[in-house]
Amino acid sequence: MNTEEKCEIVRAIDEGIGVQCRKVSGGNWADRLRKVGWLDFDMFEYRVKPKPRRHWYNEHDGQISSVTWDTRGDAKSNAAYPDSNQIEFEEVIKK
């Protein structure tokens, strides 16, 4: 990691934003415990914990559109049918 990336991790920890780590040699990302006060950039990689992605779809008569929208308003204004329902899907991130 370069200095700016390291500073981003330190800022995230300082602001209470979730940070994940894994061994430099590979493996799964794990949530970093905030109680631990040290960072070992030689042994671990760090990243800001990704936020789940959210998408909006339009549904009409049981059919869900294949087009996704970033907001409910965008989905509603682009619905093919005026009585379409807007459905929000949120990605689930599992360990």
Image (cartoon, grey):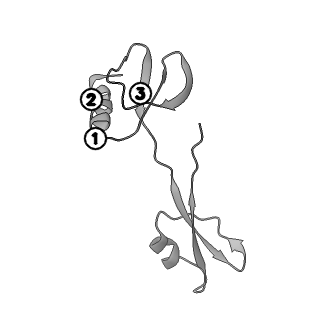
57 over 78 or under it: above or below: above
94 over 68 or under it: above or below: above
N-terminal of the pair, mark 1 or mark 2, is 2
Q: Are marks 3 and 1 in contact (CB under 8 Å)?
A: no
Drawn side of residue 2 relative to residue 65, left or right: left
Drawn side of residue 21 relative to residue 64, left or right: left
Q: Which numbered marker is on residue 15?
A: 1
Q: Which amino acid does label 2 sit on?
A: Cys
Camera-nearest residue between 86 and 92: 92
Q: What residue type is labelled 3?
A: Tyr
81 over 32 or under it: above or below: below
Question: Residues under labels 3 and 2: Cα distance?
Answer: 11 Å
Residue at 59 percent of width and 78 percent of height: 85
Q: What element carries label 2?
A: helix
Q: Quadrant location of residue 37?
A: top left
Expressed as whole percent of the image width and height from the top left, the position of residue 93 reads 57, 44
Drawn side of residue 60 relative to residue 51, left or right: right
Mark 2 packing: few (<14 Cα in 10 Å), some, or many (20+)?
few
Expressed as whole percent of the image width and height from the top left, the position of residue 94 reads 60, 41
Q: What element carries label 1?
A: loop
Q: Are marks 3 and 2 in contact (CB under 8 Å)?
A: no
Residue extending farthest to the bottom is: 82
Quarter of the image where the N terminus is located: top left
Question: Residues under labels 1 and 2: Cα distance?
Answer: 12 Å
Q: Looking at the image, how many numbered discs can be counted on the residues?
A: 3
Question: Residues under labels 3 and 1: Cα distance?
Answer: 16 Å
Residue at 44 percent of width and 19 percent of height: 44
Mark 1 packing: few (<14 Cα in 10 Å), some, or many (20+)?
few
Q: Which numbered marker is on residue 46?
A: 3
Q: Mark 2 points at which residue?
A: 7
N-terminal of the pair, mark 3 or mark 2, is 2
Q: What residue type is labelled 1?
A: Glu
